[in-house]
Image (cartoon, grey):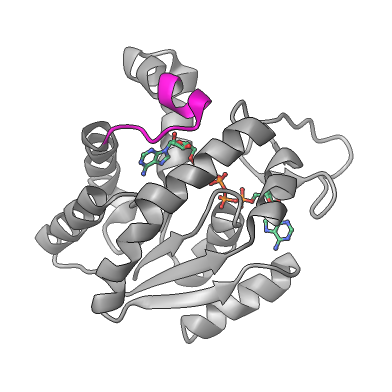
Amino acid sequence: MDLVLFGPPGAGKGTQAERLVEKLDVPQISTGDLMRAERKSGSDLGKKFDEYMSAGKLVPDELVLELMKKRLSQSDAQKGAIFDGFPRTQPQAEALDALLSEMGRKIAKVVVIEVPVEDIVERITGRRVDPKTGQTYHVRYNPPPSGVEVEQRKDDTEEVVRTRFEGYKKKTEPVLPYYEKKGLVARVDGVGSLDEVTKRIETALGL
Ligand code: AP5
């Protein structure tokens, strides 16, 4: 199954994708995570990503698509994937359809996790990540177990998240009608406990 988790920054796409991986038996593909890994490697490409990510701006489509092509060619991604944070622009959405079609696949559902901006700021500024495992936590809603050392993402400041949210409204949300026309969109209320949101997504997917 190929599934897109769509929604503003901090909606819970990554958190919910991690929970769906086992159930669907397909990998989570997060363009944000792929870019952060590239950045950590210190490569020139990683430095380029950093310029955009630190400012909360979208990375240019051609760079994102290059990354996605490479990831989709890997062996674990041959049966399906949970796309998290991708596509984010109309060209990315069309390119994903083309890439999947070459593999004889198509998107089964686009789940939009809806969360108001006030909650987003609280979620993002309270987010912490375990750099060793990539596991995401929240200081209040999903605290890390004692002994686990966590860090804060560079772009998780209130100022940067507001820029990311504006970018979502301007460039990403307008992609939804493309999927609506195909009858693929399911909207899910993202406010509630992690388990409640998981249940809503599973219901939307008929799981
Ligand atoms: P990316 O890493 O994709 O960030 P994002 O889309 O802004 O999404 P987040 O990872 O911030 O949030 P999320 O929805 O996954 O929420 P999470 O589950 O962590 O992108 C970062 C940057 O990379 C972009 O700004 C851009 O520069 C670049 N980029 C990436 N992809 C790109 C693309 N395709 N094209 C161009 N540029 C691209 O949850 C957030 C917090 O809330 C956590 O602490 C979590 O524990 C907590 N939480 C989750 N659910 C709940 C709940 N139900 N109740 C309370 N707290 C909750």
| Residue visible at 68% across and 43% down in the picture | 124
- Provide residue 5's location: percent of width, then percent of height: 45, 62
User: On the rendered structure, is 140 left or right of 28?
Assistant: right
User: On the rendered structure, is 84 left or right of 202?
Assistant: left
| Residue visible at 55% across and 79% down in the picture | 202
| Residue visible at 48% across and 38% down in the picture | 33
> Considering depth in this image, is 134 or 7 the residue closer to the camera?
7
Up/down of 155 relative to 191, above or below: above
- Provide residue 115's location: percent of width, then percent of height: 62, 62
In this orientation, does residue 136 appear?
yes
The magenta stretch spans which residues?
A: 51-60
- Provide residue 152's location: percent of width, then percent of height: 70, 30
Up/down of 5 relative to 75, above or below: below
- Provide residue 39's location: percent of width, then percent of height: 45, 21
> Considering depth in this image, is 126 or 206 the residue closer to the camera?
126
In this orientation, does residue 86 appear?
no
> Considering depth in this image, is 47 or 23 the residue closer to the camera?
47
Q: Which residue sits furthest right?
A: 146
